[in-house]
């Protein structure tokens, strides 16, 4: 006798045979459900994370050295100090007049561009997820940071309000 289970559609009690999840009436939801399971599996997959950390993030000795800094006690103390200084609020949103809670601490001038500023508290600011994404995109075009890019010889900008203006121009 084949294995069966209930249809996953809400309030549908029809029985389906394995490996299907939906009955004939609701079968159009099967592809969407399988795609969501795949997304979940990828985000919770240790092999995917391992590949990201070993191949993408730590692609060479310089990158490995840069990211090892984030696992030090010095960084955790600096991070906590900046979070408390900025009251867990995004500095980039604050410049625009918006109050957004955040827990990420970001280097204003990226350490890939100037490594001497990596432990400087004045070069750190709290940033929310959406501002961090926009700032990373801006850094890649302005400084030339990121994988496959060439570092540009530009003057570093260490003023949050100036960076916000430049980020919003893009």
Image: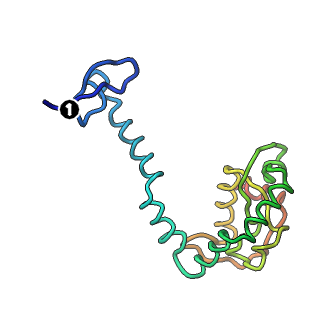
Disc 1 is placed on an element classified as: loop
Badge 1 is on which residue? Answer: 3
In the orientation shown, which residue stands out farthest toward the left? 1
Q: Nearer the viewer, residue 43 or 146?
A: 43
**How many numbered circles does the render carry?**
1
Q: How far across and down, in percent of the image, does residue 61 sit? A: 56, 82
Percent position of residue 106, x then y? 73, 62
**Residue at position x 16%, y 31% in the image:** 2
- Picture coordinates of residue 143, whole percent (x, y): 69, 71
Front-lying residue, 123 or 143:
123
Identify the coloring: rainbow
Q: Position of residue 97 (x, y in %)?
A: 84, 44
Q: Quadrant of the C terminus?
A: bottom right
Residue 16 vertical placement versus 128 (above, below): above
Q: Is residue 71 left or right of residue 125?
A: left
Taking the spot 84% from the left edge, 50% from the top edge, the residue there is 87
Give the residue drawn at x 30%, y 25%: 6
| Left or right of residue 19, residue 87 in this image | right
Figure quadrant of residue 33: top left
Residue in front for this viewpoint, 80 or 33: 80
Q: Quadrant of the N terminus?
A: top left
Mark 1 residue crowding within 10 angstroms, few (<14) / some (14–19) / many (20+): few
> In the picture provided, is 139 more to the left or to the right than 35?
right
């Amino acid at each position: 006798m084949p294995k069966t289970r209930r249809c996953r559609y809400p309030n549908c009690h029809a029985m389906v045979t394995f490996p299907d999840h939906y009955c004939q009436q609701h079968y159009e939801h099967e592809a969407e459900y399988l795609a969501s399971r795949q997304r979940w599996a990828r985000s919770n997959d240790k092999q995917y994370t391992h590949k990201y950390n070993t191949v993408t993030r730590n692609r060479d000795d310089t990158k490995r050295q840069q990211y090892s800094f984030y696992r030090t006690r010095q960084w955790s103390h600096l991070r906590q100090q900046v979070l408390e200084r900025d009251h867990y609020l995004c500095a980039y949103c604050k410049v625009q007049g918006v109050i957004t809670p955040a827990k990420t601490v970001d280097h204003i001038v990226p350490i890939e561009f100037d490594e001497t500023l990596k432990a400087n508290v004045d070069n750190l600011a709290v940033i929310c997820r959406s501002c961090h994404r926009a700032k990373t995109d801006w850094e890649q075009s302005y400084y030339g940071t990121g994988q496959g890019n060439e570092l540009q010889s530009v003057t570093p900008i260490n003023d949050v309000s100036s960076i916000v203006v430049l980020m919003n121009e893009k």
